[in-house]
Image (cartoon, helix red, strand yellow):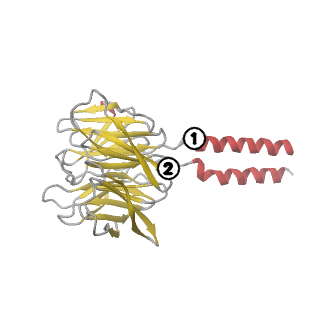
Amino acid sequence: MKLGRRWLITVIALSLLPFVSIKPTHAAPFQPGQIFVAFGGNQIAQISPPYTATDVTYFGAGYSFATSAVNLQGGGVALDENGYLYVTFGTGDAWRGIVKIDPNSRSAVKTITVGTSPDFRGIAAKDGKVAVATDNGIYVYDTNLSNLQQIQPPSSLTKTYRDVAFDDAGNLYALHQKRVDRYKLVGGTYQYDGTVVSGLGDAVAIAFDGAGNLYVVDRSGQQVRKFVRVGDGFSGPTNITRPEGITVGALFGIGYEPGINTFFVVNISSTQTELLKFSPSDTTMSVVFSSNAITNVRWLAVYPTPEPATAVFLIAGLGWLVRRVRRKA
């Protein structure tokens, strides 16, 4: 009887382990909650909680990022599930490409170039795939940066994209200045599935929250526009505005931190960068960081912390099951 009880408890515990650790965490120096931006021509800033001036680590990437706030060449950043950082580069006549950076050494472990065109812009990494927005469609790579697919929208749509994002279902979303297109994975390749949002003004970045709602950074309106998922589509938008004290610069990159259900957005100018935050229920952002040492940032990436709620509920449920088994024994 005791053996059966112990066997049951062991089986339950092992079955719950994959769910308790929702997101892996990596060894130092990359840690959950850190925010990464490429800026200033060839620098990367690693901004750690609580996001003060003393919580910033700078490291040179050895690659050229765009130095103008309006330039969309390079500066896209993304983190994969193992903590590797991917950054797009290329300015002016320089070659375009991606550099993959090791989280322990902060050094490049893989670099690819594609010539002087197309412009590599926003980038996203998820489930072994790395997608890049360009002014000539979307490029999809594996984590070793081997080319998997070049995606083009239907000929009736312009193919100039600015940012990309994956949802939790593995669908790929591509942001044009005025619309968001969706591509679904069918038979190992991404296929166009329609435009899900249109009528945007000067959109530059996109992200999803844990509920699958879509957030679009509108540079011309200086706000983030939230589109609520309804079935297979989206409704809205509702708008999240900059704080009243922020009247200069422009909103650009956005990243979601699932562990604290918070979005981070950069407000950029040629002289400084503010880091703003908001929750999905907010209508106004707040300032969490400001620096005149970081300029002309575009996209950002947030290293996610574990989502605590699921783990807490599963552990509590395991405790209840153990007590029930003991009582019956």
Q: Is residue 46 above or below residue 176?
A: above
Say whether residue 30 is visible. no
Say whether residue 304 is visible. yes
Going 70% across and 45% down the picture, which residue do you hit?
Answer: 318
Residue 149 falls in which quadrant of the image? bottom left
Going 59% across and 44% down the picture, which residue do you hit?
Answer: 310
To which residue does mark 2 refer?
24
* x then y, percent, for residue 200: 30, 49
Q: Provide the secondary structure element on which disc 1 rests.
A: helix
Residue 309 image label: 1
Outermost residue toward the top in this view? 245
* x then y, percent, for residue 322: 76, 44
Left or right of residue 179: residue 41: left
Going 49% across and 51% down the picture, which residue do you hit?
Answer: 230
Q: Is residue 122 above or below residue 58?
A: below
Question: Is 113 in front, or is 288?
Answer: 288
Within-10-Å neighbours for mark 1: few <14, some 14–19, many 20+: few
Going 35% across and 60% down the picture, which residue do you hit?
Answer: 131
